[in-house]
Amino acid sequence: MHEQEMTAQKKGRVTVHQESDGGIGVCGWLLVLFSILLTLLTLPLSIWMCIKIVKEYERAIIFRLGRIIRGGAKGPGLFFILPCTDSFINVDMRTITFDIPPQEVLTKDSVTVSVDGVVYYRVQNATLAVANITNADAATRLLAQTTLRNVLGTKNLAEILSDREEIAHSMQSTLDEATDDWGIKVERVEIKDVKLPLQLQRAMAAEAEATREARAKVIAAEGEMNASRALKEASLVIAESPSALQLRYLQTLNTIAAEKNSTIIFPLPLELMQSFMKR
């Protein structure tokens, strides 16, 4: 990470650092020499004020008479400062996460939805994070909220519900580009929840239920049509052989007997019934 900071500085991205690294003037050098002399005279007590330690995940930005010294961020480990003329600021380089508060957004098709998300970012260049902006964390949070509203304002409701990954990627690219001058690297953006108005939820549920009922009716109609075709083919086969009808009667009796019913059905030929009706 320290190598990335040095590379970014070599490319000329640390414009504020380069401008502020000019001469501190004669008075400035006199104060520095006085601070060094005072440190030497008060040894070994002054050594405890000169030695500072930063942790593995931190970097220290040293200001000498209000100007950032050459070399950029220091750390991790030990570094030295002059007690009277130097001050430093520790910058946390770990990945930071924060929740985007629910945002009321008017979509492209004029539907109001409440959307929230989460952002993962880290400080990529400690010098830029200190010198170019007052509070990088607060600025990133506010920018994430406005970016979420701007991106979702160009989408309709169906796209918001189905293309969350694409929306998150678009937000990440926009945030990463906007925070580049602050030394911030946006690593990931996720859309957590999309809340719809209660009336819209009921309307969508009714629409989905109507669609399922219509689909069920179509399937039932197709089943009836297939069954009628099968019965038609069966009737044609039975019509060609009268004995097949008798066998079908016997098969039906066998099925009824297997169910242990007390009702017994005796099939009568239709020709016999017709002869009685004529009489």
Image (cartoon, rainbow, N blue to C red):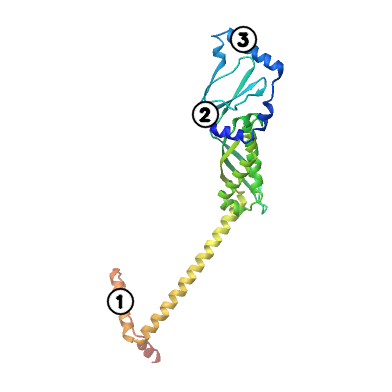
Q: Spatial distance from mark 1 to mark 2, Cα to Cα?
A: 84 Å
Quick one: label 1 or label 3, which is nearer the N terminus? 3
Residue 46 as seen in the image, left or right of residue 108: left
**Helix or strand or loop: what does disc 1 sit on?**
helix
Please tell me which residue lies in front, 24 or 66: 24
Which residue type does callout 2 highlight? Tyr
Q: Spatial distance from mark 3 to mark 2, Cα to Cα?
A: 32 Å
The residue most toward the top is 41
**Picture layout, residue 201 above or below residue 240:** above
The residue indicated by pointer 1 is 251
Question: Which image quadrant for residue 205?
Answer: bottom right
Q: Spatial distance from mark 1 to mark 3, Cα to Cα?
A: 116 Å
The residue indicated by pointer 3 is 38
Which numbered disc, 1 or 3, marks the residue closer to the eye?
Answer: 3
Decide if residue 101 is in sight here. yes
The crowding category of the residue bearing disc 2, from other C-alpha atoms within 10 Å (few below 14, some 14 to 19, many at least 20), is few
User: Residue 254 location in percent, x, y?
Assistant: 28, 74
Decide if residue 115 is in sight here. no
Please tell me which residue lies in front, 259 or 217: 217
Marks 3 and 2 close (CB-CB < 8 Å): no
